[in-house]
Image: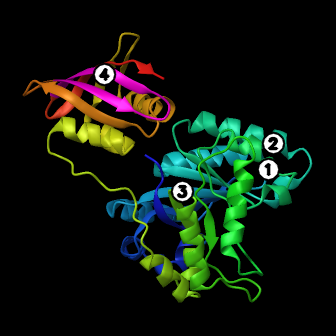
């Protein structure tokens, strides 16, 4: 599923609603955000951990946001001095919180000589650890201003581009974002852009609500599916007029289709919303999945199959049941899928159920161009 709608970045959890997880989730939901990006690491160390008690502040916020139907992404400032260590903490944190996506925030340190090889090392190691997690790059807005930055080395293994379109010391968001969009279109590889606009104060400069509206309007007019603001920490308290503008701005996230009570309805909904956890919840812990090529067993292996299908095979696909039969403990159905990577016209699956969950799953399908 394409990332869609408004998002906001959280830097320090205690500076957002006093760190109260339920309050953060309620405010985010009422503001119409579809996703929230939380800082999970800095260099090779975890972030948003209470320095006095050592308590991890992230899990209750993740749980509260998810309970409101929001996606939760993690972001990570990397320096490039220890790429393997930075990749290790990124992988560990993404798995720990089962994040919906990960953002690598790489900036001035990656303009140093020799950093292209470092970026490739980091991204290669990262993708080994989280092959099925959407990844985005957050960095400078204009590639022509930063020719030494290794854009290609990062973007080759990213799914999204999230440039920091901050018109600091100026008041020209339309120009800044349009230029950013055009410059990134001119470099290879090109990735879908979800830009981040400023919602902070620095050195006496701050964006106006009208400017932030222009930024969001321009993102829409350029065909972008979403946009973010940075950050909750500042805009909610220091710039309430900007926060209110964003909260009242109409950019809804993807519509959530109604989910029936039948397990087939739940399964297809999970595929169409790329909700790995919802799909996995439909299986018993020791479920078996069979294809003509192999047999696998257990939740870990089945989640890997689902992740590879949705991320490497049928990205952002629209799955449709074309026929179904069977009741009780056996269900058979045929299906199709249309995605930008391929199509399926011959999907044919069988569920064997135990206590209402899938204990046996046979799949047959062919992905064509």
Nearer mark to the viewer, of 4 and 2:
4
* Separation of marks 1 and 3 at Cα, in angstroms: 33 Å
Marks 3 and 4 close (CB-CB < 8 Å) = no
* Residue 223: mark: 3
Q: Is residue 82 visible?
A: yes
Residue shown at the point (7%, 28%) measured from the top left: 328
Disc on the earlier residue, 4 or 1: 1
Disc on the earlier residue, 4 or 2: 2
Residue shown at the point (52%, 42%) measured from the top left: 133
Q: Is residue 300 above or below residue 100?
A: above
Marks 2 and 1 close (CB-CB < 8 Å) = yes
* Separation of marks 4 and 1 at Cα, in angstroms: 45 Å
Task: Give SS at disc 4.
Answer: strand
Disc on the earlier residue, 1 or 3: 1
- Magenta residue span: 332-353
* Separation of marks 2 and 3 at Cα, in angstroms: 33 Å
Disc 4 target residue: 347
Nearer mark to the viewer, of 4 and 1:
4
Task: List the single residue furthest toward the left.
Answer: 328
Task: List the single residue furthest toward the right.
Answer: 113
Q: Quadrant of residue 195?
A: bottom right
Residue shown at the point (82%, 60%) measured from the top left: 108
Q: Is residue 151 above or below residue 358?
A: below
Q: Is residue 303 above or below residue 253?
A: above
Report x, y in % for residue 7: 50, 65
Disc 1 target residue: 80
Q: Is residue 337 left or right of residue 328?
A: right
Which of these two is toward me, 72 or 18? 72
* Residue 118: mark: 2
Principal secondary structure, stretch drawn in magenta: strand
* Separation of marks 4 and 2 at Cα, in angstroms: 42 Å
Q: How is the image coloured?
A: rainbow
């Amino acid at each position: 599923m394409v990332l869609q709608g408004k998002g906001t970045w959280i830097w320090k959890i205690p500076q957002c609603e006093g760190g109260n997880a339920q309050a953060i989730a309620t405010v985010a939901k009422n503001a119409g955000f579809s996703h929230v990006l939380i800082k999970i690491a800095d260099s090779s160390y975890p972030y948003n951990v209470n320095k006095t008690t050592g308590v991890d502040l992230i899990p209750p916020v993740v749980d509260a946001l998810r309970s409101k139907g929001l996606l939760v992404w993690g972001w990570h400032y990397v320096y490039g001095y220890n790429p393997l260590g930075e990749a290790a903490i990124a992988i560990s944190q993404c798995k720990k919180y089962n994040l919906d996506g990960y953002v690598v925030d790489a900036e001035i340190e990656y303009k140093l000589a020799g950093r292209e090889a470092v970026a490739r090392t980091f991204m290669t190691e990262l993708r080994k650890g989280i092959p099925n997690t959407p990844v985005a790059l957050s960095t400078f807005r204009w590639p022509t201003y930063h020719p030494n930055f290794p854009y290609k080395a990062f973007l080759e293994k990213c799914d999204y581009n999230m440039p920091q379109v901050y018109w600091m010391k100026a008041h020209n968001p339309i120009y800044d974002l349009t230029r950013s969009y055009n410059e990134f279109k001119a470099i290879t590889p090109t990735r879908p852009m979800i830009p981040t606009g400023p919602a902070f104060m620095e050195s006496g400069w701050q964006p106006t609500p009208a400017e932030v509206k222009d930024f969001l309007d321009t993102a829409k007019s350029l065909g972008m599916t979403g946009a973010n603001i940075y950050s909750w920490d500042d805009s909610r308290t220091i710039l309430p007029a900007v926060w209110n503008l964003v909260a009242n701005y109409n950019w809804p996230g993807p519509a959530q289709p109604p989910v029936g009570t039948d397990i087939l309805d739940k399964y297809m909904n999970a595929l169409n919303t790329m909700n790995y956890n919802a799909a996995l919840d439909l299986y018993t812990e020791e479920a078996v999945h069979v294809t003509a090529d192999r047999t696998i067993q257990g939740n870990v292996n089945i989640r890997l199959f689902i992740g590879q299908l949705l991320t490497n095979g049928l990205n952002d696909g629209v799955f449709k049941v074309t026929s179904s039969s069977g009741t009780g403990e056996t269900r058979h159905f045929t299906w199709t899928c249309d995605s930008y990577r391929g199509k399926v016209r011959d999907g044919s699956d069988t569920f064997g159920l135990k206590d209402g969950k899938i204990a046996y799953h046979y799949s047959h399908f062919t992905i064509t161009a």
